[in-house]
Amino acid sequence: MALNSILSLSFLILLSLKSTSGYYVVVDAHTDECFFEKITAGTRVLLTFEVIEGGFLDIDVKITGPDHKEVFRGDKESGGKTTFSAHIDGTYTLCFSNRMSTMTPKTIMFTIDLGDTPKLDVSTDGTGGNVTSHHNKLEELVAELSTTLMNVKHEQEFMEVRERIHRAINENTNSRVVMWSCFEAFILLAMAFGQVYYLKRFFEVRRVV
């Protein structure tokens, strides 16, 4: 009995897993990169993105619906997340714009999570209705658990990306500090040898034959 319950719960978790798409994309300077997703009305959509390389780590983001209505817009964003519900059936457009950059391409990591497609409520009388209600509640709990696990997974991925970015910035800063210190040491040595040579020549006694 316990084994059957575990198998049933596992099967419900697999059924409740939402469609998730993860991408890495390079957006060249003065260009846009757009992606298209066909979504059913009422479906909840979660977009998470992060600029991981290029320039000041900023990008313009815009989401438009099938009716060309603007759903979300962000200017010079370095990263973030947004959630919205599809208002009509059709193809939604996600665009990353790097037109503000003159010569630097941007590398972006982003994921799109699609929630469960809304279902029509089908109820039956008597015991069947109670069973259906119980299964619906169980599906809702499993879907909530799946959403939480997916969010944790995405947060871990983006934290790893941020850690790589910060490590690269720190290594770059350290290398610049070392190079500047070496340059300063070279200048000090050159000035010291120059002063010694000048003073030696200044106090040098010259004989006139």
Image (cartoon, rainbow, N blue to C red):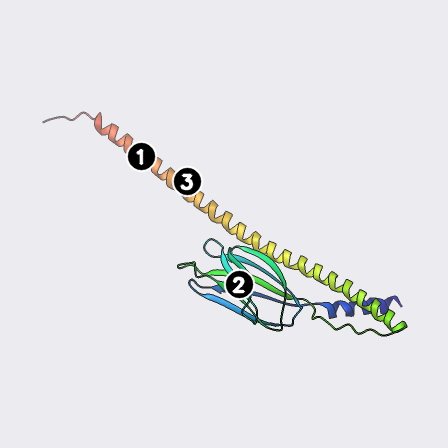
Which quadrant: the N terminus?
A: bottom right
Contact (Cβ within 8 Å) of mark 2 with mark 3: no
Crowd around label 1: few <14 · some 14–19 · many ≥20 (10 Å): few
* 192 lies left or right of 118: left
For label 1, the residue is 191
| Residue 30 percent across, percent down from the top left | 42, 63
- Give the residue displayed 32% in from the left and 37% down from the top: 190
Which amino acid, mark 1? Met
For label 3, the residue is 181
**Camera-side residue of 35 and 153:** 35
Q: Earlier in the sequence, mark 2 or mark 3?
A: 2
Q: Is residue 33 above or below residue 179?
A: below
* Quadrant assignment, res 204: top left
Q: Is residue 168 above or below residue 111?
A: above
- Give the label, 1 or 2, closer to the camera: 2
| Residue 9 percent across, percent down from the top left | 80, 67
* 123 lies left or right of 199: right
